[in-house]
Image (spheres, coloured by chain):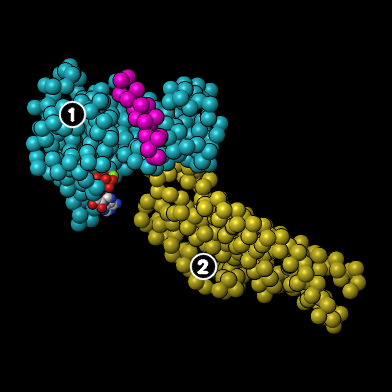
Amino acid sequence: MASTQSAAAPVASPAIAPMIVMEAVEKWYGPYKALTDINLSVRQGEKIVLCGPSGSGKSTLIRCINHLEGYSKGRITVGGVNLTESAKTIDAVRRDVGMVFQQFNLFPHMTILQNCTLSPMRTLGQSKAKAEATARRLLERVKILDQADKYPAQLSGGQQQRVAIARALCMEPKVMLFDEPTSALDPEMVKEVLDTMIGLAEDGMTMIVVTHEMGFARQVADRVIFMAKGEIVEEGHPKDFFTAPKHERTRAFLGEILRH
Amino acid sequence: MSSQEILFLLSGLKWTLALSAVAFVTGAIFGLLVALARTSPNRIVAKAAEYYINVFQGTPLLMQLFVVYFGLPLLGLKLDAWIAVAIGFTLHASAYLGEIWRGAIQAVPRGQTEAASALALTYWPRIKDVVLPQALRISLPATVGFLVQLIKGTSLAALVGFTELSLAGKFIANQTFRPLVVYSVVGLLYFIICWPLSLYGARLERKFAAASR
Ligand SMILES: Nc1ncnc2c1ncn2[C@@H]1O[C@H](COP(=O)(O)OP(=O)(O)OP(=O)(O)O)[C@@H](O)[C@H]1O
Ligand SMILES: [Mg+2]
């Protein structure tokens, strides 16, 4: 399905297997079908923006990739690991996949630095010194090193979200998932978070971003994917996607959000 | 009251405090296991913990003490009164603390466990480093409140012949024929222990209410 677009995107060596492959994925919440026949292949270094109306399954889709939600049917492979229900594959995939949430979800009882060093120490077995050195380097990169010893509640929303990005990067992930990372922010803080994400994209990170920030999509995305009712309706390079959407639902959706 | 009688009351107080401390500490250890079992993703484990809590919350503490004290010897297990009441109160405290902490664990926002999972933290570090520190803070007022109930509740141990503060009071009252004075002193001793704890619990509660606003 993606093949028609990949010609427009930077060419990846065909020898390199895709970073993420979703094949005929279905997800049911009880009797409710949240995802229908999702087929998606993401190359290493590719940046994807996922958009669509509320309830269309965007969060569900990316949460299946790191198994915060189990999927019901189909097949998901991340970094060559076939994601199943087994704890071993789930752990392996989660080590390679970082995630940033709408509500930041920093650990409130830990300092910024402790937030960043917890999993590298516990999961990767890093020494405290090594984990702290990495954390400081990444906090510096998101321009927040001077707040390292504060607690999350002492920071603004934009600062907290940048910490959340740094915390995820401390695990040295191969993929970063973002679920509406700027939706909970005051407007004046959106830019600092988007700039951080743009920097990450320029460094070659593989990213899937659920967002309605269409400026970001235009600037960064290799592909924009539009979802509705649990299905991928349309995907394309942002240039084509925004100027010549093929489906009526996409046009309606774009009309809706661009008016705001 | 003679100083000897006062000393006898104080030795009763000592046993009340010892029993409370043992019941609270062992109850807390088992209560933590109960709370973790109750919130476990394993359905069978969670169900077993639920039954455990229901049984010990749904029957009078006195019956539990009787079962341990009079029932176990029938099975050939002759227990010291001290051990028997310690076991009885531990069971009781673990069920109540287990339920208090279950609620606290579930009150920690879901985003916290999700963020921990997304960082590839496995069950134990997720619980130990992320969930429990937040849950214990949430549960502190209720936990202190339960401790006060537990201290007063240890007076039930008198009914199986364990000479804690209230039974010591009864002996002295019978000896001196001055129940009003003796029981007032006994009541005062309970109050001196429990009141500061109650105040502390109320203060924690106000503090957390203010913090969550
Ligand atoms: N845990 C759940 N149990 C039952 N239904 C759920 C659950 N999570 C999501 N759903 C349903 O699945 C559908 C897709 O939800 P999802 O959160 O993926 O949508 P979304 O595209 O991210 O929407 P939004 O823009 O509002 O975040 C919705 O109809 C939602 O009600
Ligand atoms: Mg969502």
Tell whether B12 sits left or right of A122.
right
In the image, residue B159 lies at what x, y percent?
Answer: 67, 75
Confirm whether circles 2 and 1 share one chain: no
Q: Residue at x 56, y 31 (%)?
A: A149
- Quarter of the view holding residue B149: bottom right
From the image, which quarter does the N terminus of chain A lie in? top left
- Mark 1 falls within which chain? A
From the image, which quarter does the C terminus of chain A lie in? top left
Range drawn in magenta:
A185-203
Residue A188 magenta: yes
Chain identifier, cyan in the render: A
Q: Which mark is residue A53?
A: none
User: What colour is chain B?
Assistant: yellow
Circle 1 residue: A238
- Quarter of the view holding residue B97: bottom right
In the image, residue A165 lies at what x, y percent?
Answer: 39, 31
Q: Nearer the viewer, residue A140 or B156?
A: A140
Q: Nearer the viewer, residue A184 or A116?
A: A184
User: In the figure, B44 relative to A191: above or below?
Assistant: below
Q: Residue at x 17, y 48 (%)?
A: A229
Neighbours of disc 1 within 10 Å: few (<14), some (14-19), many (20+): many
Circle 2 residue: B56
User: In the figure, A162 relative to B174: above or below?
Assistant: above
For badge 2, the amino acid type reads Phe
